[in-house]
Each structure stands twice: as structure tokens, then as C-alpha cells.
Image (spheres, rainbow, N blue to C red):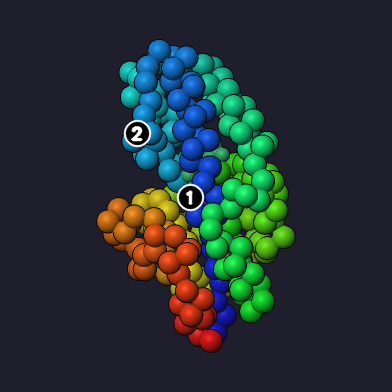
Amino acid sequence: QNIGFIFDLDGVIVDTAKYHFLAWKKLANELGFEFTIEQNEMFKGVSRKRCLEILLDIGKVTATQEQFNTWMHDKNVDYLAYIEKMDASEILPEVPKVLEFLKKNKIPIALGSASKNARPILKKVGLLAYFDAILDGNNVTKAKPDPEVFLLAAKEINIAPENCIVFEDAVAGIAAANNAKMTSIGIGDASILVEAKYNFKDFTEMSLDFIKELIGK
Ligand code: B16
Ligand code: MG
């Protein structure tokens, strides 16, 4: 039976949430209000457009369509400046070990991310070559918790959704995986990712034996 693995990017492979936070905070401050690290939690796994809508709600700011587009653009320019400086040291612990193990066992690997910057980030940290398919914010019309991004990824690696295993750090991402009838694995706080089939704090807590079991070896 063929099995495939789908990885979320931010919060699973790299911790780019801190850069998203700094860029959103800068915009909020320019617009005259505060944006906290706690509020940034709501932005995880959420599209750029939706993030700006939430941010403007927080600041009670109304925008014309033109302003909205300008602010989305400005935020991304700031974010890209952070990405520019990224390297392999920012890969989260033991992610390469898991990718290497899957590659060795000829298991297809896909990325399923909400980010439109997924490809350049994977390239920067040197992990691009591991991925047989990359589905990201540029490929989808419906955001997580809609299963679209994961279903497209499954299709591209030619694995039935029921045989796909998804690593996710966001509540919306776990819901998307479950909606796709995939096996969801929560990476992060188990008390938040309650809908996940399995939970791990991070990859250091996950043994290769657990992955072997998942792939039936
Ligand atoms: P961009 P993921 C998501 O990535 C982030 O968690 C979320 O905070 C961000 O707003 C979204 O990507 C869009 O990112 O502005 O780069 O298109 O967790 O789905 O890999
Ligand atoms: Mg994520």
C-alpha cells in the first residue's frame, strides 16, 4: 500500500511565524495600534489576505481596496527581507532526519502550505530537493480548513488521500487534513491541536519507529 507524507511549512519545517509577526507588528504600529505575539497566534496557517482583515479588525481600521492592497504588499516586502537572511540553521530540530528517512524509503513527500513564499523559503534553507510536489498559497482558491491544498498535494504525488499523513501546527491545518480524510499529526501544543489523530511537541519527540509503523515497515 502506497503512503505519502505532506508537510506544512511554517511551524513544522521552519519557524517563520516570528518574521510574519515582526512584519505585521510594523504595519500595525504604522497604522497607530499595537499587535501582540498572543494575537499573532490567530494568524498561523491563515492566508495573507485573511491576516490583514483580522489585523485591521484588531486596530478598528477601515481601508479602501487600494490601501488594503498596498498594505498587503508592504507587509510582504518586509517579510521577504527577513526570509532573505534565512539559512539551514533555521530548520526546526530533526526535520532533515525525518525527510532523509522518508527519501531513503522512497516515500513521496509533498508540501501543503498557505504561504505564497513557500518555494523561496525551502530553497533558502536547502530543503527544496526533498519535495516531490509543492502546493502552496499560489495554487489554492480555498484556505485551510478547506482540504483543497492537501487534496491537490495528494493528487500530485499520486497517493489516495486516506493514505496521506499530514504534519501540521495550526488548528485550521489539522481540520483541513481531517476534512481531506488524511491522517493528521499535530506538531506543537496537544491541548490546542485537539483534533489531531496523533500529537507531538516537535520532531525530537517522534521516533523513526513511529514513522516506520505509519508506513508499515
Ligand atoms: P504568505 P503555513 C502560513 O504558512 C503561515 O502560517 C501564516 O501565518 C501566513 O499568513 C500564511 O502562510 C501566508 O503566508 O504571506 O507568505 O503568503 O503554516 O501554511 O506553511
Ligand atoms: Mg503552519
Res 73 → quadrant: top right
Would you name the residue on which mark 1 appears? 11
Question: Which residue is at 58% across, 32% downward?
Answer: 79
Q: Within 10 Å of the Cα at label 2, are there few (<14), some (14-19), or many (20+) other Cα atoms?
A: some
Q: Say what amino acid the circle numbered 1 marks.
A: Gly
Q: Which residue is mark 2?
A: 39
- Can the viewer see residue 62 in this picture? yes
For the point 48% across and 41% down, the residue is 17
Position of 59 relative to 187 (above/below)? above
Indicate which disc, 2 or 1, sits on the residue closer to the N terminus.
1
What is the x, y in percent for residue 198? 36, 68
Q: Is residue 8 visible?
A: no
Distance from Cα at disc 2 to Cα at disc 1: 16 Å
Q: Residue at x 62, y 49 (%)?
A: 89
The total number of labels drawn is: 2
Closer-to-camera residue (97/122): 97
Disc 2 under 8 Å from ligand 1? The reply is: no
Q: Quadrant of residue 51?
A: top left
Q: In the rendered structure, find residue 171 and report the number of the disc placed on it.
A: none
Q: Secondary structure at mark 2?
A: helix
Whether ligand 2 has any atom under 8 Å from the Cβ at mark 1 is answered as yes
Q: Is residue 60 left or right of residue 101?
A: left
Q: Nearer the viewer, residue 65 or 196?
A: 196
Vertical side of 207 occupied by 12: above or below:
above
